[in-house]
Amino acid sequence: MEVGSGHLLARKEINDLQCTVLGVGRNATVNVYLFNAGDGSAYDVKIADSLPKRFQLVEGSLTADLGEILAGETSTFSYQMKTNETQIVVRNVPAKITYRRNSEGAFFTANSSIPSTKTRVIASFEYARLVESHYIDFAIMFGLFCVSVPAPGLFWWRSKNNRLKEE
């Protein structure tokens, strides 16, 4: 790596509650994070991504001109997509990034990393059962925890105080 040049590291994520499943008809946010690990700026940064088969763009754009990314800085590119088909496995394709490592240099092309786990699309009722119902479970467990943890301590404290009053 040249001294005083930019060096971008790119990571692509499908960010839908950090799950490996997507619900039919539900928006999924795709984030591409660009980190400049070089000791100089990366210039004329452009990004181009593509949708998986059978997905539609809901919000945002598949291309962007991010301009300059300074050394040590992170830039994020996002868009939302969805599908109306079920029982498909999402094939993630890397995003293409082009940039100049210094202000007068030639363009350099790189690919982002992609999620290592397979993402699949399931029916909405299954998705709700897998993801949304856990909020109720967490609330119930939190309530039980709040009652069960202080209760033994309270009983011990009261019995200790009763014994001290008797003596």
Image (spheres, helix red, strand yellow):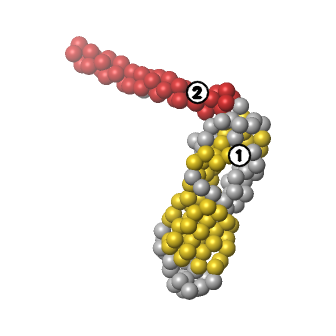
Looking at the image, which residue is at 50% across and 80% down?
A: 40
Depicted 65 relative to depicted 13: above or below: below
Q: Residue furthest top?
A: 166
N-terminal label among 2 and 1:
1
Using the numbered discs, state the Cα–Cα distance from disc 2 to disc 1 in whole angstroms.
Answer: 26 Å
Task: Say if residue 35 shows up in the picture.
Answer: no
Residue identifier under label 1:
55
- Asked whether, in this view, residue 162 is left or right of residue 110, the answer is left
Looking at the image, which residue is at 48% across and 26% down?
A: 139
Depicted 9 relative to depicted 131: above or below: below
Horizontal and vertical percent position of residue 158: 30, 18
**Tag count in the figure?**
2
Question: Is label 2 or label 1 in front?
Answer: 1
Horizontal and vertical percent position of residue 118: 73, 47
Q: Which mark is residue 133?
A: 2
Looking at the image, which residue is at 75% across and 37% down?
A: 85
Q: Amino acid at mark 2?
A: Ser
Horizontal and vertical percent position of residue 54: 75, 45
Mark 1 secondary-structure assignment: loop
**Within-10-Å neighbours for mark 1: few <14, some 14–19, many 20+:** some
Q: Amino acid at mark 1?
A: Phe
Q: Nearer the viewer, residue 126 or 143?
A: 126
**Within-10-Å neighbours for mark 2: few <14, some 14–19, many 20+:** few
Q: Nearer the viewer, residue 66 or 155?
A: 66
Looking at the image, which residue is at 63% across and 57% down?
A: 62
- Quadrant (top left, top right, bottom left, bottom right) of the C terminus: top left
